Amino acid sequence: MRRTRWQGSKRRRLMRTGAVAAAVVAVGASMLTACGDDSSSSSQVTLLTHDSFDLPQSVFDEFKKETGQTLKVVKSGDAGQLASTVSLTPGSPKGDAVYGIDNTFATRPIQAGALESYASPALADGADQYAVPDSNNELTAVDRGDVCLNIDDEWYRREGQTPPKSLRDLTDPTYAKQAALIDPGTSSPGMAYLLSTVGVFGDNWQDYWKQVSAGGATIVSGWEIAYNQLFTAGEGKGDKPIVLSYASSPAATPGTSALLDSCFRQVEYVGVLKGAPNVAGARKLVDFMLSPTVQKALPSSMFVYPVQKNTPLPDGWAQRAPIPQSTVNLPPAYIAQNRETWLQQWRSAVGR
């Protein structure tokens, strides 16, 4: 999926920008065809991923050490663009593997027949708990990044005000005016929050948005504007003490916290592309993404939670960024079936 100033400027889970020195990186879908022939080498694995992919140099060195293969990274937009790129080229992929398609788009490439089934031996260590329902291991979970409201607790203490306790509190105009939310039509975390409200309020989710919008909530196009410009604890020291971000965001922003009851579970997957020139290398990459080397690196480098059990989190995460004990989780097929309708209804509810 890949958020605050400590994650680089972007995004945009969902916002985790950065260059990987060891990888040959081509940015944008327009570059994909040009690099397609390079993946034919059995000593190189070409990975299609989102623009926010970022892992340390040491991780790439370890992959080559363990497999004898180098990793070429091809960045191709956000999770939605990535899913579209893969879905449009079944059997004739522009790489060997794909990472970064999340559970809101997972059914698209599966239904397009663009992915090979592969069950990694490491699945049973935790990743299998995040499997796409009714699938055949076309996608393997790597990480989760829960999207939820963040609160500037220091601001509320300074102002002598009581902070909200739940996403339901935003129906109160006092809190609505203090909130920086994100358009679900232009942003992955924005879509995740819309899905949260669908999961929490059911048939009444549109009424929630009507109240929040009428109460004065600010809705912007992307996470970067919301967090780093409008949020009182962001880089821009804005005037909104409530912002849509991630459960992991407080780990690097002292004095803030996440409302863990409002989180939507966003899972990112890796998969082997059907017709890949280097299928064996792609499978090794899937295994490697579940290895302790990668799983331990994910929180510090991409600010997401690992899916493998017993993976240690960085110091301070247990206190400042605990993993939500319960999250909203809608079936990917249900999301795919209703996404466009929900977006139209959301626009009507907020007057856009």
Image (tube, grey):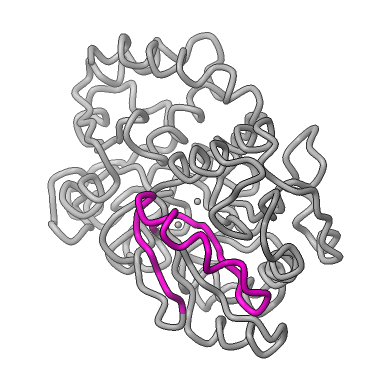
Taking 172 as reference, is 11 above or below it? below
Q: Position of residue 68 (x, y in %)?
A: 69, 86
34 displayed left or right of 105: left
Residue 271 image-quadrant placement: bottom right
Q: Position of residue 236 (x, y in %)?
A: 13, 57
Q: Nearer the viewer, residue 161 or 326?
A: 326
Q: Residue at coordinates 55% horizontally, 24% vertically from top-left? A: 200
73 displayed left or right of 327: left
| Residue 237 appears in the rendering | yes
Taking 79 as reference, is 311 above or below it? below
Q: Position of residue 182 (x, y in %)?
A: 30, 35
Q: Is residue 100 magenta?
A: no
Magenta segment, which residues? 23-51
Looking at the figure, which quarter contains the C terminus? Answer: top left
Residue 322 image-quadrant placement: bottom right
Q: Nearer the viewer, residue 287 or 277?
A: 277
| Residue 309 appears in the rendering | no
Total tally of numbered discs in the picture: 0
Q: Residue at coordinates 70% horizontally, 72% vertically from top-left? A: 288
259 displayed left or right of 44: left
Q: Is residue 42 magenta?
A: yes
Taking 269 as reference, is 331 above or below it? above
Taking 231 as reference, is 336 above or below it? above
Q: Residue at coordinates 48% horizontally, 46% vertically from top-left? A: 82
Q: Position of residue 169 (x, y in %)?
A: 37, 28
